[in-house]
Image (tube, grey):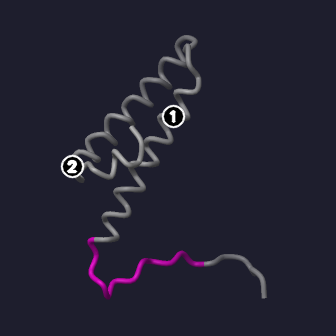
Amino acid sequence: MNARELRQKDMDDLKKMLAEERKGLSNLRFRSAVSEIENCAQFGKSRRQIARILTLLAQRERAGKPEGAAPARPKQTGSGRQ
């Protein structure tokens, strides 16, 4: 499922899909530890799908926040450039 199709889903469906993808990735890791798997590219596909879903969830959560709420900025560590 591509990003365009994911955007049409509601939040509950995305959360359900996220749980399923994470469970599938866990099963894939288990299978690879026990025996060889046929398609190693499935790891990357599953991780990318999880990232797509997490990105959409984060975008929707940010869009639902009030206008005055600024996103938290991470503190810079180290000297950085001057």
Work out whether residue 38 or residue 81 is closer to the camera in this orientation and state it.
Answer: 38
Was residue 70 drawn as part of the magenta stretch in this picture? yes
The residue that mark 1 highlights is 45
Image check: 22 left or right of 43? left
Q: Quadrant of residue 82?
A: bottom right
The amino acid type found where label 2 is placed reads: Asp
Q: Position of residue 10 (x, y in %)?
A: 22, 52
Mark 1, other Cα within 10 Å: few <14 / some 14–19 / many ≥20: few
Residue 56 is tagged as: none
| Dots 2, 1 in contact, CB < 8 A | no
- Secondary structure under badge 1? helix
Residue 12 is tagged as: 2
Mark 2, other Cα within 10 Å: few <14 / some 14–19 / many ≥20: few
Q: Does 53 appear above or below 69?
A: above
The amino acid type found where label 1 is placed reads: Lys
Task: Give the prevailing secondary structure in the magenta stretch.
Answer: loop
Q: Position of residue 8 (x, y in %)?
A: 28, 50
Q: Residue at x 58, y 27 (%)?
A: 41
Most extreme residue toward the front, as rendered?
4
Looking at the rendering, in which quadrant would you find the N terminus? top left
Q: Does 38 appear above or below 78?
A: above
Was residue 48 drawn as part of the magenta stretch in this picture? no
Q: Earlier in the sequence, mark 2 or mark 1?
A: 2
Q: Residue at x 21, y 49 (%)?
A: 12
Q: Which residues are magenta?
A: 64-75
- Secondary structure under badge 2? helix
